[in-house]
C-alpha cells in the first residue's frame, strides 16, 4: 500500500497520526517520516483494511471517536511491523508468536504506549524509552509470551511537576451547589406524577432524575458561572421540556442528546423573524435579545403564574413547561406584553392541569382545529422505520450474495491446497494463511447456510428456510424502484434544465424528488425489517469470510499457481476449470459495489426519507438548501447509473419501475407471532406473516383430480409465484 499524499483523506489521516504519535514535532516532518515507513511495509498490509481504517479515522469528528479510530489504525499497522521484524529473523515465526502479537498489540488504551513505540521506532521518531518498549515487544513475540519485567513508557522530556496553583477565591465562590439548586427547583415547582413511570412518582426518583438534568444543563454553560438565578431558570425549564417530551431515563444513551436539544430550544428566539434554520433536525441560528430569547419568555411565564397562584398551591413543572413553550411559539400574539401574556398563561395553565388530571386532552375543544402529529423520525436523528445498522447488515448480505462465486472459488482452492494439488511450498508465508483459513471454515457459514440467509433476507432463490418464515421476495423490486426513480429524476432534471433556462425558473417545477424519497423510504423500511437480531452477526461473519477469501485469492503464490495476475482472474480460472462455468465478474462486482453505495447512503441519511420539511430532496436551481448535500446526491445518481448500465435496465422497465405505487403497510419491528411457538397467528400487520397454506391445498386438490392449473390460477393460489 502506497499512501497518496495528494488525497485530502490521506492528508487528514497523516495529520491526525502526526498529532497522536509526536505532537511536539512539526506535522509535516512527522507525516513525511510516516509515509516513508508505510511505503516500506506496504506489501505486508492489507490494502482494503488499511483503507477502511483510514477512512474511518478521517470521518471521525468527536475527539473520543478520533482516539478510538487512531488506536484501531495504529494497532493494525503495529502488528504488521512486529510480524515483519519477526520474519526478518525466521521465515516462520510460529503460531504462538503470531497469537501473542494479535492479543498484545491491540486497540486498547492499556497497550497504546507499546503500539506508539513500535510506530515511532519504525519511522525513526523515537522518544523516551521507545526502543526499550519495542525491543520488549519483539522479545515477547519471539517467545510467544510476555517477558518480565514489563517496561513502562517514560516521557520524552520529563519536567518537574509544577507547584499547585494558589487557591482562586473568585473561582471557588463561582462554584454552584447542584444539590441546593435541585432543592430550590423542587421548592418552587412540583413534578406532577400523573402519567409518569413508577421511577418518577417518588421523591427519591425525582431527585435522581432532576440531578441528571441539572448536571447536563450546567455543563452546557448558557449562563455566567455562579449565576444561581439563571442556573435555576435554565434547569427548571429544561427539566419541564424533558418531562413534556417523555425523556424519563437518565441512563438512556440518548438522554443527554435530548437534553441538549431542549437547551438549544430555550436559547433560541421566540420571534420568528430572527430564526434561521441550519439543518434538517429543526436546529436554528438566532439573534435574540434579552426580551425575545425563549428562556426569557419562560422566566416571564413562571413569574406570572406564580403571582396568579395561591402560595400554598403547587405549580406543576410539566404544565408550566407546556404553557411557556406555547407562549414562546405564539410570540406574535403578545409580543412580550405581560398584561396579555398573564391572561393567556393563566387560562392555558388551568386547562392543562385539568387535562392532566383527567389523563388526556382536557376536552376543551381547543385542540380540534390544530392537531400536530409527531414526526416519523426521532428529533435526534433516529428513524422509527429505518434502523441504519439493519440496512448496513442487509447490505453486507447482498454483497456476499453477489460474490458467492468468489467464496465457492476460494473454498475449491482450499480443497486443492489441502489435497497437495497446488504448487505452493510449505515454507511460503501464503501456505500458512491458506491452511489457517481451511481449518477455520468450521466457524464460518457453509454454502447451504449462506443460501438460506440469502433467501430469507433478499428473497434469492435456491435456499431452504423454515416453513413459517416468509422470504423477502420484495427486495429486488424495491431496489429496482430506487434505481429507476433516481435515474428518471436525473433524466427529467437534465431535460428541464433547458426549459428552465428559457423560462428563467418560472415553469416546469419537478416533483420527481419526492417520488425518489418515497421509493427509498419503502426500500429502507423493507431492508431494515430484515436486519434485526441475528442478521447483524450473520452479516459480520459473512463479511469476515469474504474479506479473508478475497485476500487468499489475491496472494501472489495463488495467482502464480493459476498463471494470472488479479484475484478476479483467479476466480474466472477456477470457475472454468472446476465448475465449468464462466462468471460475469464485471456484473456481480458492479452490482455489489453500487448497491452497497446506495444502501450506505440510505443508512447514513436515514432521517430524510420519512420527512418533508418543505425542502427538496436533491439540490435544485433557485432553492437555498436541500435534504441531501450535492456531493451525496451526485454519488447516489452515479451509483444508479452504473447499476442500470450493467443490468441493461431499458426505458420501458425504467418507466414501469419509476411510476409511483401506493405505500404498503410496513412495520418497523418483526412480528414474533409469525414464528411458531411465540403465540399469535402472525396476522394483524406483522412484518413476516406465516405462509397461507390454503393456496397449496387448492393446488394439491387440483393435481390429485387430474386438473392442470393455468398460470393465472397459480398466481392466485401462490401470491409469491
Image (cartoon, grey):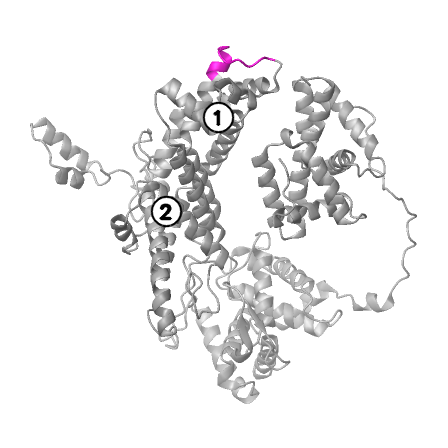
Q: Residue at x 38, y 44 (%)?
A: 643
Residue for point 57% across, 17% down: 431
Q: Is residue 125 found left or right of 632 in the rendered image?
A: right
Q: Which residue is mark 1?
A: 444
Locate residue 247, reporting x and y percent.
54, 59
Disc 1, SS: loop
Compared across the picture, whether 318 is left or right of 692 comes to right
Look at the image and tell me in which quarter the C terminus lies.
Answer: top left
Judge left or right: residue 143 versus residue 686: right
Segment tinted magenta in the rendering: 415-426
Which x, y percent locates residue 150? Answer: 81, 29
Report x, y in % for residue 225.
Answer: 75, 69
Of the numbered discs 2 and 1, the one sitting upstream in the chain is 1
The label shown at residue 526 is 2
Say if the magenta span includes residue 118. no
Outermost residue to the bottom: 339
Amino acid at each position: 500500500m502506497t499512501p497518496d499524499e495528494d488525497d485530502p483523506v490521506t492528508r487528514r489521516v497523516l495529520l491526525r497520526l502526526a498529532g497522536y504519535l509526536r505532537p511536539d514535532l512539526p506535522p509535516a516532518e512527522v507525516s513525511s517520516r510516516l509515509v516513508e515507513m508505510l511505503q516500506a511495509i506496504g506489501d505486508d498490509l492489507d490494502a482494503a483494511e488499511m483503507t477502511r481504517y483510514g477512512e474511518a479515522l478521517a470521518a471521525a469528528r468527536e475527539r473520543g471517536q478520533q482516539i478510538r479510530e487512531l488506536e484501531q489504525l495504529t494497532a493494525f499497522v503495529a502488528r504488521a511491523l512486529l510480524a515483519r521484524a519477526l520474519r526478518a529473523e525466521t521465515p516462520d515465526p510460529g503460531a504462538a508468536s503470531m497469537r501473542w502479537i494479535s492479543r498484545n498489540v491491540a486497540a486498547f488504551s492499556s497497550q497504546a504506549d507499546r503500539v506508539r513505540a513500535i510506530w515511532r521506532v519504525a519511522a525513526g521518531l523515537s522518544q523516551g524509552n521507545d526502543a526499550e518498549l519495542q525491543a520488549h515487544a519483539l522479545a515477547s513475540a519471539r517467545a510467544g509470551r510476555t517477558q518480565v519485567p514489563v517496561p513502562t513508557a517514560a516521557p520524552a522530556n520529563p519536567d518537574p511537576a509544577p507547584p499547585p496553583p494558589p487557591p482562586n477565591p473568585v473561582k471557588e465562590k463561582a462554584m454552584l451547589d447542584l444539590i441546593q439548586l435541585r432543592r430550590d427547583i423542587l421548592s418552587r415547582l412540583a413534578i406532577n406524577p400523573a402519567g409518569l413511570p413508577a421511577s418518577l412518582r417518588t421523591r427519591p426518583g425525582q431527585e435522581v432524575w432532576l440531578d441528571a438534568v441539572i448536571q447536563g444543563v450546567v455543563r452546557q454553560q448558557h449562563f455566567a458561572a455562579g449565576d444561581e438565578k439563571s442556573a435555576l431558570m435554565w434547569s427548571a425549564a429544561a427539566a419541564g421540556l424533558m418531562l413534556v417530551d417523555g425523556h424519563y431515563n437518565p441512563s438512556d444513551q440518548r438522554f443527554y442528546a435530548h437534553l441538549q436539544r431542549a437547551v438549544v430550544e430555550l436559547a433560541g428566539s421566540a420571534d420568528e423573524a430572527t430564526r434561521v434554520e441550519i439543518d434538517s433536525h429543526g436546529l436554528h441560528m438566532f439573534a435574540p435579545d434579552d426580551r425575545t430569547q425563549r428562556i426569557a419568555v419562560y422566566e416571564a411565564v413562571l413569574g406570572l403564574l406564580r403571582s396568579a397562584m395561591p402560595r400554598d398551591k403547587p405549580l406543576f413543572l410539566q404544565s408550566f413547561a407546556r404553557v411557556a413553550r406555547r407562549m414562546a411559539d405564539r410570540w406574535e400574539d403578545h409580543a412580550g406584553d405581560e398584561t396579555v401574556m398573564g391572561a393567556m398563561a393563566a387560562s392555558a395553565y388551568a386547562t392543562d392541569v385539568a387535562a392532566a388530571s383527567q389523563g388526556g386532552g382536557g376536552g376543551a375543544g381547543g385542540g380540534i382545529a390544530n392537531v400536530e402529529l409527531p414526526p416519523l423520525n426521532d428529533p435526534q436523528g433516529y428513524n422509527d422505520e429505518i434502523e441504519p445498522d439493519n440496512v448496513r447488515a442487509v447490505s453486507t448480505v447482498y454483497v456476499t450474495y453477489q460474490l458467492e462465486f468468489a467464496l465457492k472459488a476460494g473454498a475449491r482452492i482450499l480443497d486443492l491446497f489441502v489435497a497437495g494439488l497446488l504448487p505452493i511450498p510449505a515454507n511460503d508465508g501464503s501456505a500458512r494463511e491458506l491452511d489457517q483459513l481451511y481449518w477455520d471454515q468450521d466457524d464460518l457459514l457453509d454454502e447451504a447456510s449462506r443460501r438460506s440467509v440469502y433467501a430469507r433476507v433478499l428473497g434469492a432463490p435456491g435456499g431452504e428456510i423454515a416453513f413459517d418464515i416468509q422470504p423477502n421476495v420484495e427486495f429486488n423490486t424495491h431496489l429496482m424502484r430506487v434505481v429507476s426513480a433516481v435515474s428518471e429524476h436525473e433524466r427529467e432534471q437534465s431535460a428541464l434544465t433547458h426549459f428552465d433556462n428559457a423560462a428563467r425558473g418560472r415553469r416546469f417545477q419537478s416533483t420527481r424528488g419526492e417520488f425518489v424519497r418515497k421509493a427509498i423510504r419503502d426500500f429502507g423500511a423493507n431492508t431494515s425489517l430484515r436486519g434485526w437480531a441475528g442478521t447483524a452477526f450473520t452479516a459480520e461473519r459473512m463479511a469476515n469470510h469474504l474479506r479473508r477469501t478475497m485476500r487468499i485469492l489475491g496472494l501472489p503464490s495463488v495467482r502464480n499457481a493459476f498463471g494470472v495476475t488479479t484475484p478476479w482472474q483467479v476466480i474466472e480460472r477456477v470457475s472454468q476449470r472446476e465448475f465449468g462455468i464462466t462468471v460475469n465478474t464485471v456484473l456481480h462486482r458492479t452490482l455489489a459495489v453500487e448497491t452497497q453505495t446506495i444502501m450506505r447512503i440510505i443508512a447514513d441519511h436515514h432521517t430524510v426519507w420519512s420527512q418533508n420539511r418543505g425542502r427538496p430532496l436533491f439540490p435544485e436551481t433557485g432553492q437555498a438548501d436541500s435534504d441531501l448535500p450535492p456531493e451525496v446526491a451526485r454519488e447516489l445518481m452515479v451509483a444508479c447509473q452504473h447499476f442500470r448500465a450493467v443490468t441493461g435496465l431499458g426505458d420501458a422497465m425504467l418507466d414501469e419501475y419509476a411510476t409511483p405505487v401506493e405505500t404498503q403497510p410496513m412495520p418497523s419491528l418483526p412480528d414474533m407471532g409469525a414464528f411458531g411457538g411465540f403465540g399469535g397467528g402472525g396476522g394483524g400487520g406483522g412484518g413476516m406473516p406465516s405462509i397461507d397454506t390454503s393456496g397449496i391445498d387448492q393446488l394439491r386438490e387440483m393435481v390429485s383430480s387430474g386438473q392442470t392449473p393455468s398460470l393465472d390460477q397459480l398466481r392466485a393460489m401462490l401470491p409469491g409465484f
